[in-house]
Image (spheres, rainbow, N blue to C red):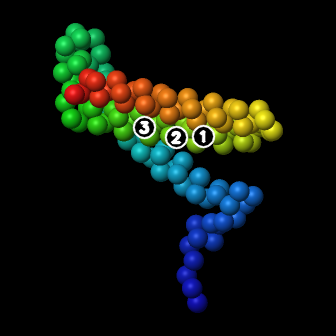
Amino acid sequence: MRYLTDRKRAEGKGASHTGTEHHWHMTVSAVALAFLVPTFLIIFGGALGGTREEVLATFARPFPAILTGLTLLVGMMHFKNGAKMMIEDYWQGTMRKALIMLVVGLSWTIAATGLYALARIAL
């Protein structure tokens, strides 16, 4: 007798055959954000109100720069997946496709712009 976990039994079920995978990605990114966001807020709060040179010095250090980049990337991918799921649930036809393209483009644009700005500060 094979031992199957609940996750293995649910894989491939549903109309799109990716519901379990999507739920798993959303859960993992939500847990990651639960740790990243408070830590980022502590670092950002410490830099808030400082002079330009102090803020640049804070984000030029490796830990704040890496943490900021991870928070930005994970947050935007979580936003993209959640907004895409919402659009798939409530819109149909051409409008659905256009909104999904808009959300995906917006999330990647924000992530790329933020990482570019962070790289300019850190390097």
Mark 2 or 3: in front is 3
> Residue 42 placed where, x, y %?
30, 28
How crowded is the residue under tag 2: few (<14 C-alpha within 10 Å), some, or many (20+)?
many
> Which numbered disc, 2 or 3, marks the residue that appears first in the sequence?
3
The circle on residue 26 is: none
Label 1 to label 3: alpha-carbon separation? 14 Å
Mark 1 or 3: in front is 3
- The answer to whether residue 37 shows anywhere in this view is no
Which quadrant does the C terminus fall into?
top left
> Residue 65 placed where, x, y %?
27, 32
Q: Secondary structure at mark 2?
A: helix
Which quadrant does the N terminus fall into?
bottom right
The circle on residue 78 is: 2
Q: Secondary structure at mark 3?
A: helix
Question: Label 2 amino acid?
Answer: His
Label 1 to label 2: alpha-carbon separation? 6 Å
Q: Which residue is nearer to you in this view: 38 or 102?
A: 102
Label 2 to label 3: alpha-carbon separation? 9 Å
The circle on residue 82 is: 1
Residue at 22% across, 19% down? 56
